Each structure stands twice: as structure tokens, then as C-alpha cells.
């Protein structure tokens, strides 16, 4: 990148990228090829949805969990469907 202006933007982007709290995920639509077929995963700003049977029964599923892992710090705050990282293997 030669352009000096662009270079400054690039540096600023690096700082922003370290502050995920500045970002709010508003909407997301994902198509995912799972073991049992193609799933449509979406997030509407409030909650996740998935087209699979497990989601219909339990309100979450492996597809949504995988999407959250992919999103990393951008993933929306967990809903109360699933306790996240609360179990710290006390039997170790
Ligand atoms: Zn699913």
C-alpha cells in the first residue's frame, strides 16, 4: 500500500479491530452445509434462527454455535438458551 492516506486508514483499522465493543452486529444470514443438509442460519439483531430440527426443539443448535465461534468477539451476547463457558471442569 503506497498511498499514505490509505496507510493511515489501515493503521486505524487495526486499532478499531482490537475494540470489538465498538461494533454491533445487526443482521446476519448464513448458508451452511451441515452433515445432514444445507441449513439457513440467521440473526436479526435480537436472536438467532436456524432451519434445522434441533433448533426448533431446543432454540439453539450446533450450526448457530459454530457461527458464533466463527464470529469470535463479534458474536452477539448469548441468550439464556445455553450457559456459555460456565462449566469450568471442576473434576480435573
Ligand atoms: Zn441448526
Image: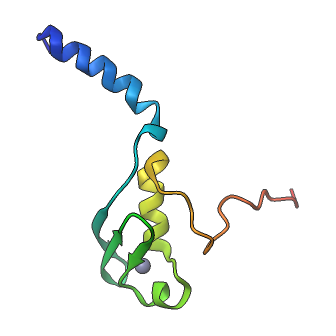
For residue 67, side relative to residue 11 (left or right): right
The structure's colour scheme is rainbow
Residue drawn at (76%, 62%), measured in percent from left and top?
87
For residue 84, side relative to residue 56 (left or right): right
Image quadrant assignment for residue 37: bottom left
| Place of residue 24 in the rendered image (x, y in percent of width and height, measured from the top left) | 40, 49
Q: Quadrant of ligand 1?
A: bottom left
Residue found farthest to the left: 3
Vertical arrangement, residue 42 with respect to residue 20, above or below: below
Vertical arrangement, residue 74 with respect to residue 65, above or below: above
- Quadrant of the snapshot with the N terminus: top left
| Place of residue 66 in the rendered image (x, y in percent of width and height, measured from the top left) | 45, 64
- Quadrant of the snapshot with the C terminus: bottom right
For residue 24, side relative to residue 10 (left or right): right
Vertical arrangement, residue 25 with respect to residue 40, above or below: above
Instruction: Choose between 37 and 48: the one closer to the eye.
Output: 48
For residue 35, side relative to residue 3 (left or right): right
Residue found farthest to the right: 91
Residue drawn at (44%, 48%), measured in percent from left and top?
74
| Image label count | 0
| Place of residue 6 in the rendered image (x, y in percent of width and height, measured from the top left) | 17, 17
Vertical arrangement, residue 47 with respect to residue 23, above or below: below
Amino acid at each position: 500500500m503506497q498511498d499514505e492516506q490509505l496507510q493511515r486508514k489501515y493503521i486505524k483499522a487495526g486499532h478499531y479491530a482490537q475494540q470489538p465493543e465498538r461494533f454491533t452486529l445487526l443482521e446476519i444470514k448464513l448458508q451452511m452445509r451441515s452433515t445432514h443438509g444445507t441449513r439457513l442460519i440467521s440473526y436479526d439483531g435480537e436472536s438467532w434462527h436456524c432451519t434445522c430440527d434441533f433448533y426448533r426443539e431446543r432454540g439453539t443448535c450446533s450450526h448457530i454455535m459454530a457461527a458464533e465461534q466463527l464470529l469470535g468477539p463479534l458474536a452477539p451476547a448469548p441468550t439464556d438458551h445455553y450457559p456459555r463457558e460456565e462449566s469450568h471442569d471442576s473434576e480435573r
